[in-house]
């Protein structure tokens, strides 16, 4: 309004500012952050295109904690809203349940590993299984094994491969599936001096860390692709596992990645 008054009515800047109760600094202010706003918008579009189920919080934590940008969250959120990148939140009816007993929180790596199976199908309709292994301390995905059948001896082989580079866990937490209660696995953990902790039947919350990890696996990549072969699933699992451990901020860790929890930065 002040600029219009100066331009159309040929009055001085001071007179226009006095009449409209604004300061001279306000009149002369020029925004300096337009180029930086374009950079923020470019990053947000790139992230939400690559990781289609990432909301604002994951995008902001990635930019702040992984990439090291110091942008204020209100500024980034304003641009996020302006770009209309908001995820639609579908309300759910929830059943009120009794609060489960809190899980033991490990204080170091290799104190407790959790493992669990998932199921999905190829485009041909043939079902396959995934075995997920997780370190509860820093929520690091230690491995995703994919095959049509994963009996107890395959579970042992996966664990042995992880132990070669990670070290041996003190406790293995799992449900009561036939592979986990088989004598083959029980004999192996006894020889390895590893304690196996089976959760109570019908109490998946006792294995909450890996159950939450399974949900991330499901929504981050498994539900977003239709695979034709097991090789395609394995390739995508390997690629996603690196992103999850090195680049994806984890809410349970305060917005840092599993590798950052160990003090290891991605390369």
Image (cartoon, rainbow, N blue to C red):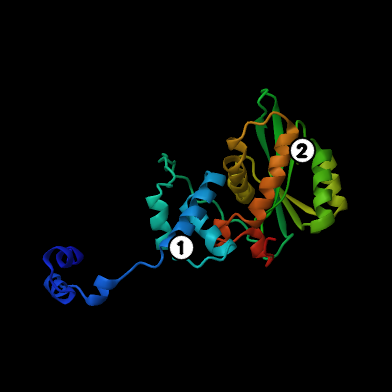
Picture disc at residue 217:
none
Q: What residue lies at 60% left-to-right and 54% top-to-bottom?
A: 248
The quadrant of the rendering that contains the C terminus is bottom right
Q: What residue lies at 62% left-to-right and 38% top-to-bottom?
A: 222
The residue to which callout 2 is attached is 179
Picture disc at residue 36:
1
Classify residue 21 by image quadrant: bottom left
In this view, 130 is above or below 135 = above
Most extreme residue toward the right is: 191
Is 22 situated left or right of 48 in this image? left
Residue 198 rendering spot, x and y as whole percentages: 70, 46
Residue 107 rendering spot, x and y as whole percentages: 67, 65
**86 or 21, nearer to the observer:** 21
The earlier-in-sequence mark between 1 and 2 is 1
Circle 1: is it few (<14), some (14-19), or many (20+) Cα within 10 Å? few
Most extreme residue toward the front is: 10
Q: What residue lies at 49% left-to-right and 49% top-to-bottom?
A: 45
In this view, 175 is above or below 21 = above
The quadrant of the rendering that contains the N terminus is bottom left
Residue 36 rendering spot, x and y as whole percentages: 46, 63
In this view, 154 is above or below 65 = above
Q: What residue lies at 65% left-to-right and 32% top-to-bottom?
A: 120
Classify residue 255 by image quadrant: bottom right
Residue 213 rendering spot, x and y as whole percentages: 62, 48
Most extreme residue toward the top is: 124
**177 or 1, nearer to the observer:** 1
Is 37 situated left or right of 63 in this image? left
Mark closer to the observer (1, 2) = 1
């Amino acid at each position: 309004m002040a600029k219009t008054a100066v331009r159309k009515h040929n009055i001085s800047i001071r007179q226009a500012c006095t009449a409209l109760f604004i300061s001279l600094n306000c009149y002369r202010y020029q925004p300096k952050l337009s180029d930086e706003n374009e950079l923020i918008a470019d990053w947000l579009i790139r992230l939400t295109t690559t990781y289609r189920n990432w909301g604002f919080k994951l995008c902001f934590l990635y930019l702040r904690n992984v990439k090291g940008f110091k942008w204020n969250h209100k500024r980034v959120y304003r641009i996020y809203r302006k770009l209309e990148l908001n995820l639609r939140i579908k309300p759910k009816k929830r059943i009120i349940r009794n609060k489960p007993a809190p899980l033991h929180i490990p204080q170091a790596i290799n104190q407790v590993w959790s493992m669990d199976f998932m199921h999905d199908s190829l485009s041909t309709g043939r079902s396959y299984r995934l075995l997920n292994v997780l370190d509860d301390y820093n929520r690091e995905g230690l491995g995703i094994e994919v095959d049509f059948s994963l009996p107890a001896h395959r579970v042992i082989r996966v664990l042995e491969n992880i132990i070669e580079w990670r070290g041996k866990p003190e406790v293995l937490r799992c449900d009561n599936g036939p592979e986990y209660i088989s004598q083959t696995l029980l004999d192996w953990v006894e020889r390895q001096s590893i304690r196996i902790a089976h959760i109570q039947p019908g109490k998946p919350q006792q294995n909450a860390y890996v159950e939450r990890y399974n949900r991330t696996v499901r929504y981050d990549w498994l539900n977003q692709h239709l695979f034709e072969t097991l090789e395609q699933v394995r390739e995508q699992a390997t690629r996603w596992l690196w992103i999850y451990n090195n680049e994806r901020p984890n809410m349970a860790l305060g917005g840092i990645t599993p590798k950052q929890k160990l003090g290891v930065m991605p390369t």
